[in-house]
Each structure stands twice: as structure tokens, then as C-alpha cells.
Amino acid sequence: MRKTRDNQTGTINLLTGIYKADQTMTRRLEKLAARLGLPILDKIPCRGSVLMVAGNGLSLMSKKDRGTPMQVRVDFTDRDWQRRLHCVRGEQLIKAMGRTAAKDTAIIDATGGLGRDGFLLAAAGYRVVMIEKNPVLAALVEDGLFRAADNDRIREICSRITFHFGDARLYMQQKKPDVEIVYLDPMFPEQKKTAKVKKELQMIRYLAGGSDNMAGLFHTALETASRRVVVKRPQPGPWLANLSPSYSVDGKTIRFDIYLRP
């Protein structure tokens, strides 16, 4: 297993390498390997985590000595997503953006993760800048967006997303964008998750390494947003940075804390 460090973020990712499952993907694999500083493998190791390049996209595979390998792939074209997009305006996340928010409102998703919340925001009509600092998660999201943009049903959604690989705090400080809403989703253990989702979260936390300076990112978000900052939190759970929100949108297992700006 090899450690790779991204110079921009200082994030350490523990991966064995990149495996090519589709022999036609050589050029893409070589570019990704060079970008991440990972070796190209001629076979999947008996255990450990690898990135796999195949015809159906890029995936992260974690394999142990026993049991079925766990794979994480970003796919916005599957049936579950289509059903969810059909009633996207009823999502708690969308309600947390405010009733008066116009469909073309500019939103920064400062903790992009696997891109799910950012994609929902774009599906609701918002213009989204999605930012992810972990190079492996960023590669998975970019792959998912690339394939989604080639799908006639959701191409328009992708056109409202600008993806940025890097540090969201630096982005907001340097770009000083004219943005109305900043959205934050600090990782936390959610309740009532299926075994598959729990394993996915474990893999993401394994990749992400140590916790970010969420308090610093939060305060930068408060300085950046002209209308509101929305923070996803466990239900029940403490306020981020112990700062009381203006109000909250509550659900059974999560809530969205809303911080209105002057």
C-alpha cells in the first residue's frame, strides 16, 4: 500500500494503486495515475483499496481477505437517482435554501464529498460551485459528472455545476465570489443507515483522513455568503462551532441549521 500526499491540501490517501479493468481505457488511466501519483496495477491485490477504471466509470474498491469487495462509484444516471430527481423540490436540503431563493441562485457547496447534495441543488435549478479537496473523491465526482453530462435526461443539471478541486476556504478567500448561499456538510455518523451506506461512509472517512478545520471553513462561509449559510448536522447534535443558528429545518435523523446573513 502506498501513501500519496496532495501538495495543495496535505491530504494523505492510502491506496495500493490504479487497476485497469477495461483495456480500452489506457490513456485515461495513465493520466489519472500521473495526477494522483499512483502506480498502475496489472491485477487487483488480495486486500487493500484501489481505484478501478472500467467502461462503466471510475470506482473505489476496498477488498479484505474475506467477504465481497466494497465499491464506491458516483453514478447520477441510475434509477434511484431518477426517482429522487423527480421530486427534488420536496427534499429537506432544498427547503433549507429558503422559500424566496430564485432557481438561479448561486450556491457554493464547500464540502463536495461524493457530489450528491450538490447535484440535488443543481437539479432544483440552482447554480452550484462544488468544491472537494480530497483528490480521490474529486476524481470520483468528476467521473460521475462527466458521464452524467453525456446523458440526455440530466445533461441540463450538469450544465449548472462548476466543479473545483481544491480548498474551499482558499477558494472563497481568493475568488471572493458573488455568492448568495454557502452549504456545508461536515462528515458525521448518521443513524438508520443501510449496511452498504455505512461501508461507503467508512471508506470515505478512510480516504479523507483527519478532520478538516470546519470551524475555520464555517467562519469563512459566514463572511462569503450574502444571504445564508446552511449546515447539515445530525439530529440531535451540537451546533457547528457552538454558534446558534437563526433557525433549523428538522428531519428524523438530520437537520439543516440556517445562519441568515445581514
Image (spheres, helix red, strand yellow):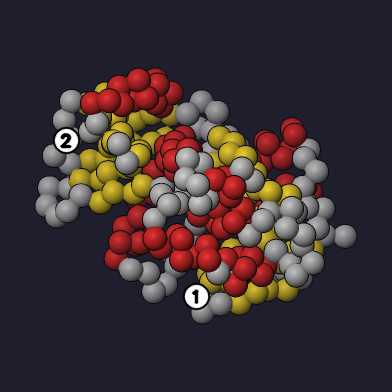
Q: Earlier in the sequence, mark 1 or mark 2?
A: 2
For residue 93, above or below residue 249: above
On the picture, is 142 further left or further right than 230?
A: left
Placement of the N terminus among the 4 image quadrants: top left
Residue annotated with mark 1? 253
Q: Nearer the viewer, residue 258 or 162?
A: 162
Residue 134 horizontal/vertical position (percent)? 48, 39
For the point 50% across and 32% down, which residue is it? 10
Determine which quarter of the picture holds residue 79: bottom left
Would you say 19 lies left or right of 83 here? left
Task: Please indicate whether residue 181 sits to the left or right of residue 129 in the image.
Answer: right
Q: Within 10 Å of the Cα at label 1, are there few (<14), some (14-19), or many (20+) other Cα atoms? A: some
Q: Is residue 97 above or below residue 20?
A: below
**Amino acid type of the residue tagged 2 in the rendering:** Pro
The location of residue 100, given as percent across then percent down, is: 79, 67
What residue do we see at 59% from left, 56% from top?
Answer: 123
| Residue 29 percent location from the top left of the image | 33, 25
Q: Quadrant of residue 155?
A: top right
Q: Residue at x 80, y 58 (%)?
A: 227
Which residue does the image show at 34% across and 62% down from the upper left?
198
Q: What residue is shown with label 2? A: 45
* Helix, strand or loop under label 2: loop
- Look at the image and tell me whether residue 26 can be seen: yes
Vertical position of residue 27 compared to residue 208: above or below: above
In-front residue for pair 57/246: 57
* In this rendering, position of residue 78 left or right of residue 111: left
Q: Amino acid at mark 1?
A: Thr
Measure the alpha-carbon separation of dots 1 and 2.
37 Å
Q: Quadrant of the C terminus?
A: bottom right
Determine crowd level at label 2: few under 14, some 14-19, many 20+ residues with C-alpha closer than 10 A.
Answer: some
